[in-house]
Image (cartoon, rainbow, N blue to C red):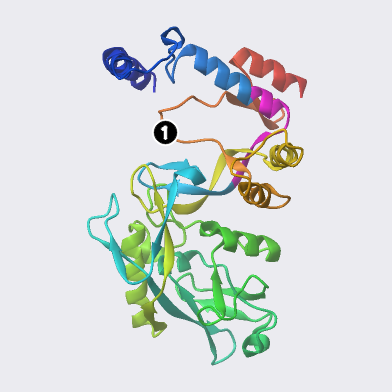
């Protein structure tokens, strides 16, 4: 990393002046004496101070949650860096890191055999490769078609184990077959359902988008190769129930054009509940005035109680400031994280805990 930062500094010295010169020739009226560089020591100090203050105040914390993950960057990215592409029919995308176009806009039906019965539950999915991480299937409590299966178990054909049928109001009885596969480690909605019902969380992809863990014969495959292979294997097992065109939204990385994968990763997050409350109060009390006025309703709806999500503020790319946090281990084996400007300061903070 130090070598990278050194090279970036060389680039800035070589190209930065030319860019400023071009801005000046274009007539930009700026205070040129306040020129700063993203990776400058002054900016580093400002970033560190803000992070430390927020963490000491309990607003920044480290946790394992689902994040927007770019396998091409091997990094988490923010919600703002995700472009949501509407797909209305069978469509093929070129995806970085994969050597052939990938098909989207298709819904696949997969049969799960009910344990102790000759019946089956058919789930619909646009991401069949994620079934390798299914740890449950869900039905709506009011759906009369499936009341007989409440509390039942189905057989996972690849992991060779039983997974439960859970009842949850999140399920839309009108969508697909009305039965939903639950993959807590690779879908935001499934994560929430899994938390409500205590389902196992099973990650089946690595940071580069290749299958890992309990994927058996699919281990090592690229996620989109596994998509095809899973469907082929399901056909051989007599569990493939067809496919049809289906409108969907594909999350695409704005930096690389890669298809974003929800992944469970330990990252740094900012608790937004207090910030959102202050932002709503500022608009309501007119300390902050939005123009045009109609955006006030959108602001309050987006930031209202229970609407906001904590922000993932960490990335795994070198371009940026390192998080000023230290993992500290006590002689007895206890561990904690502290934010500090130096290792010495971190030791002092850890000792005081």
What is the residue that sits farthest to the bottom in this orientation? 118
Q: Is residue 187 magenta?
A: no
Q: Residue at x 52, y 82 (%)?
A: 177
Q: Height in image: 240 above or below 163?
A: below
Viewer can see residue 129: yes
User: What range of the chain is rendered magenta?
Assistant: 52-64
What is the residue that sits farthest to the top in this orientation? 33
* Residue under pointer 1: 317
The residue nearer to you, when weighing 264 against 169, is 169
The residue nearer to you, when weighing 146 against 281, is 281
Give residue 139's position: percent from left, percent from top.
Answer: 62, 78
Q: Quadrant of residue 240?
A: bottom left
Label 1 sits on a secondary structure element that is loop
The residue nearer to you, when weighing 98 against 214, is 98
Q: Is residue 96 left or right of residue 268?
A: left
Q: Residue at x 33, y 59 (%)?
A: 221
Q: Residue at x 64, y 64 (%)?
A: 193
Give residue 353's position: percent from left, percent from top.
Answer: 76, 25
Q: Is residue 23 left or right of residue 278?
A: left
Viewer can see residue 329: no
Look at the image and tell me in which quarter the N terminus lies: top left
Q: Height in image: 37 above or below 276?
A: above
Tell me if mark 1 has few (under 14), some (14-19) or many (20+) residues whose alpha carbon lies within 10 angstroms of its own. some
Q: Residue at x 28, y 18 (%)?
A: 22
Q: Is residue 75 left or right of residue 172?
A: left
């Amino acid at each position: 990393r130090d070598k990278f930062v050194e090279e970036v500094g060389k680039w800035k010295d070589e190209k930065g002046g030319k860019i400023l010169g071009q801005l000046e020739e274009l007539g930009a009226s700026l205070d040129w004496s306040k020129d700063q560089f993203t990776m400058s020591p002054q900016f580093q100090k400002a970033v560190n101070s803000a992070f430390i203050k927020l963490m000491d105040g309990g607003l920044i914390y480290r946790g394992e949650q689902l994040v927007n993950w770019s396998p091409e960057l091997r990094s988490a990215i923010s919600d703002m860096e995700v472009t949501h592409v509407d797909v209305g029919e069978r469509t093929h995308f070129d995806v970085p890191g994969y050597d052939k176009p990938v098909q989207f806009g298709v819904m696949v039906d997969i049969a799960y055999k009910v344990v102790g019965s000759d019946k089956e539950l058919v789930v619909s999915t646009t991401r069949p490769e994620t079934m390798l991480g299914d740890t449950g299937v869900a039905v709506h409590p009011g759906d009369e078609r499936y009341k007989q299966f409440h509390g039942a178990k189905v057989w996972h054909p690849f992991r060779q184990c039983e997974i439960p049928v859970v009842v949850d109001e999140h399920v839309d009885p009108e969508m697909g077959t009305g039965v939903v596969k639950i993959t807590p480690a690779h879908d935001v909605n499934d994560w929430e359902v899994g938390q409500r019902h205590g389902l196992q969380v099973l990650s089946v992809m690595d940071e580069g988008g290749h299958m890992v863990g309990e994927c058996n014969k699919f281990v090592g495959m690229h996620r989109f190769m596994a998509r095809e292979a899973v469907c082929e294997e399901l056909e051989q097992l007599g569990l493939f129930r067809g496919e049809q065109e289906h409108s969907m939204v594909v999350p695409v990385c704005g930096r690389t054009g890669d298809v974003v994968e929800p992944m469970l990763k330990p990252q740094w997050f900012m608790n937004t509940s207090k910030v959102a409350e202050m932002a709503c109060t500022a608009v309501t009390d007119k300390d902050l005035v939005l123009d045009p006025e109609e955006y006030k309703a959108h602001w309050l709806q987006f930031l209202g109680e229970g609407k906001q999500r904590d922000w993932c503020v960490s990335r795994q790319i070198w371009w940026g400031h390192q998080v000023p946090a230290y993992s500290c281990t006590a002689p007895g084996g206890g561990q904690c994280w502290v934010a500090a400007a130096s290792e010495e300061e971190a030791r002092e903070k850890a000792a005081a805990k």
